[in-house]
Image (tube, rainbow, N blue to C red):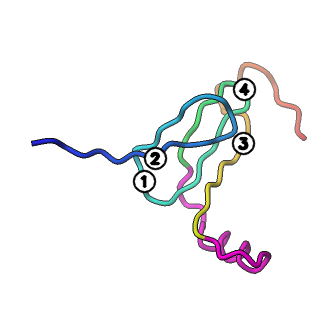
């Protein structure tokens, strides 16, 4: 018997291929130094969609939200300047 595996291909602003086994709606965060990508749970994606609906005449059918920052490991290597 063959098993089917669903995964999501992530486009997170870099040139590398990223894959996500968790196909439920959630956002991501990417380190701008090492390009590590992690899931971010607990973000109210419905609230973000509501704001987008109010600010656009589009019929919104989906969203891909990726936050960017410096991961703790990279921050330890070099102090981050706040921007």
Q: Residue 24's spot in the image, x, y percent?
A: 44, 58
Q: Quadrant of residue 43?
A: bottom right
Task: Give the extent of the magenta segment.
Answer: 40-60
For the C terminus, the image quarter is: top right
State the separation of the CA atoms marked 3 and 1: 21 Å
Judge left or right: residue 25 versus residue 15: left
Identify the mark nearer the N-term, 3 or 4: 4
Label 3 SS: strand
Residue sitting at x 29%, y 44%: 5
Residue lying at the far top in this picture: please name it: 77
Element on which disc 1 rests: loop
Query: Pointer 4: what residue?
Result: 33
Q: Nearer the viewer, mark 2 or mark 3?
A: 2
Marks 2,3: beta carbons within 8 A = no
Q: Give the alpha-carbon distance from disc 1 to disc 4, as whole Å.
A: 26 Å
- Is residue 41 within the magenta segment? yes
Residue 38 % position (x, y): 55, 40
Nearer-N-terminus badge (2/1): 2
Q: Earlier in the sequence, mark 3 or mark 1?
A: 1
Residues tagged 3 and 1 counted as in contact (Cβ below 8 A): no
- Secondary structure, mark 2, is strand
The numbered disc on residue 8 is: 2
Residue 24 magenta-highlighted: no
Taking the image as shown, residue 61 lies to the left or right of residue 80, namely: left
Q: Given this view, does label 1 or label 4 mark the residue nearer the observer? A: 1
Which residue sits at x=65%, y=54%?
65
Marking on residue 23: 1
Residue 17 falls in which quadrant of the image?
Answer: top right
Residue beneath label 3, please?
68
């Amino acid at each position: 018997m063959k098993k089917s595996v669903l995964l999501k291909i992530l486009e997170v602003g870099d040139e590398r291929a990223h894959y996500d086994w968790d196909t439920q709606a959630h956002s991501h965060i990417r380190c701008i130094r090492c390009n590590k990508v992690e899931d971010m749970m607990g973000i109210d994606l419905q609230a973000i969609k509501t704001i987008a609906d109010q600010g656009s005449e589009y019929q919104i059918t989906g969203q891909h939200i990726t936050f960017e920052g410096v991961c703790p490991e990279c921050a330890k290597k070099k102090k981050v300047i706040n921007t």
